[in-house]
């Protein structure tokens, strides 16, 4: 995570934005009123999807079960009966 203040952010805005996009850097901007976090849209969408999935009852357990299932026990999607 990069740390900066509002004045420095203003002076180097495009450098900070490019760093966020190119390297997935998260930028913490310190202001007199508090801190602001800048992150890429891709990272933001990932966080929102994670929050959504973990809010569905039982989904966390299903995801963990899937992660712990060996590939050899997996069934191709086109063979799954819906």
Image: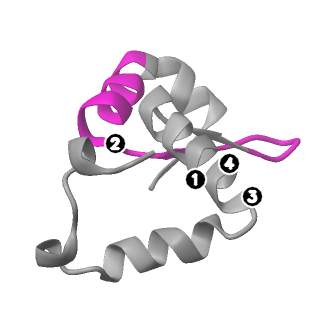
Query: Does residue 34 show up magenta in the picture?
Result: yes
- Which residue bears the numbered disc 3? 55
Q: Residues within 10 Å of mark 4 (few under 14, many from 20)?
A: few
Q: Residue furthest left?
A: 72
Residue depicted at x 19% and y 52%: 76
Q: In terms of depth relative to the viewer, which is nearer, 7 or 17?
A: 17
Real-space CA distance between mark 3 and mark 1, rounded to the nearest whole angstrom: 8 Å
Q: In terms of depth relative to the viewer, which is nearer, 57 or 54?
A: 57
Residue depicted at x 37% and y 45%: 25
The reply, left or right, for residue 32 in relation to residue 28 is: right
Q: How is the image coloured?
A: one colour
**Badges 1 and 4: C-beta atoms under 8 Å apart?**
yes
Residue depicted at x 48% and y 68%: 63
Span of residues in magenta? 14-35
- Secondary structure type for disc 2: loop
Q: Position of residue 78 (x, y in %)?
A: 23, 41
Q: Position of residue 36 (x, y in %)?
A: 70, 41
**Badges 3 and 4: C-beta atoms under 8 Å apart?**
yes
Query: Image quadrant for the C terminus?
Result: top left
Name the front one of labels 2 and 3: 3
Q: Residues within 10 Å of mark 1 (few under 14, many from 20)?
A: few
In the rendered image, the vertical position of residue 6 relative to residue 2, given as above or below? above
Real-space CA distance between mark 2 and mark 3, rounded to the nearest whole angstrom: 25 Å
Residue depicted at x 68% and y 70%: 58
- Which residue bears the numbered disc 4? 52
The reply, left or right, for residue 25 in relation to residue 52 is: left
Q: Which mark is residue 24?
A: 2
Q: Which mark is residue 73?
A: none
Real-space CA distance between mark 2 and mark 4, rounded to the nearest whole angstrom: 22 Å
Q: In terms of depth relative to the viewer, which is nearer, 50 or 25?
A: 50
- Which residue bears the numbered disc 1? 50
């Amino acid at each position: 995570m990069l740390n900066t203040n509002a004045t420095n952010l203003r002076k180097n805005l495009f450098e900070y934005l490019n760093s966020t996009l190119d390297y997935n850097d998260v930028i913490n901007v310190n202001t007199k009123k508090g801190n602001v976090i800048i992150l890429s849209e891709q990272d933001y969408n990932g966080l929102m999807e994670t929050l959504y999935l973990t809010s569905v009852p039982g989904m966390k357990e299903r995801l963990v079960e899937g992660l712990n299932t060996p590939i050899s026990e997996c069934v191709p999607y086109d063979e799954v009966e819906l």
